[in-house]
Image (cartoon, grey):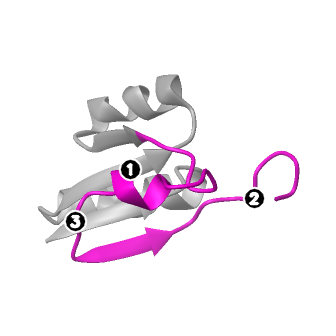
């Protein structure tokens, strides 16, 4: 199963790690490219993407499930 985890704070990280341990394929979505790339060491495919940006949905890969753990942007939007 391929799972997208949007938001990589403490909750998203714990969920992603657990899914990897279960043998699932996981893609993490994070706004910051540098932070997204750092997650690759955990065996998870990083995707730097601001989900609030117009057209962001076009960059999302196909997935069997989505876990939404993202926080609001810094401006509260």
- Which is more toward the observer, 58 or 28? 58
Which residues, given as a range, are shown in magenta?
48-77
Query: Magenta stretch containing residue 74, yes or no?
Result: yes
Residue 11 in percent (x, y) is at 55, 61
Q: Secondary structure at mark 1?
A: strand
Mark 3 or 1: the one toward you: 3
Identify the image quadrant of the C terminus: bottom right
Disc 3 versus disc 1: distance between alpha carbons?
13 Å
In-image side of 22 versus 74 (left or right): left
Q: Quadrant of residue 31?
A: top right
Instruction: Please report contact status of discs 2 and 1: CB closer than 8 Å, yes or no.
Output: no
Disc 2 versus disc 1: distance between alpha carbons?
17 Å
- Which is more toward the observer, 15 or 72? 72
Query: Magenta stretch containing residue 57, yes or no?
Result: yes
**Residue at x 44% of width, y 49% of height:** 29
Residue 68 in percent (x, y) is at 52, 70
Query: Which is the main secondary structure of the residues drawn in magenta?
Result: loop
Q: Secondary structure at mark 3?
A: loop
Residue 5 in percent (x, y) is at 41, 61
In-image side of 68 versus 40 (left or right): right
Instruction: Name the residue beneath numbered marker 2.
Output: 72
Instruction: Name the residue beneath numbered marker 3.
Output: 62
Residue 63 in percent (x, y) is at 23, 69
Identify the image quadrant of the N terminus: bottom left
Q: Earlier in the sequence, mark 2 or mark 3?
A: 3
- Which is more toward the observer, 23 or 47? 47
Instruction: Name the residue beneath numbered marker 1.
Output: 28
Disc 2 versus disc 3: distance between alpha carbons?
24 Å
**Residue at x 22% of width, y 40% of height:** 43
Above or below residue 58? Residue 49 is above
């Amino acid at each position: 199963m391929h799972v997208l985890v949007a938001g990589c704070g403490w909750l998203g990280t714990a969920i992603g790690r657990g899914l990897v341990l279960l043998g699932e394929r996981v893609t993490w979505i994070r706004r910051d490219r540098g932070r997204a790339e750092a997650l690759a060491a955990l065996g998870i495919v990083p995707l730097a993407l601001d989900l609030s940006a117009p057209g962001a949905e076009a960059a999302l890969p196909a997935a069997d499930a989505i876990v939404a753990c993202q926080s609001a942007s810094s401006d509260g939007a």
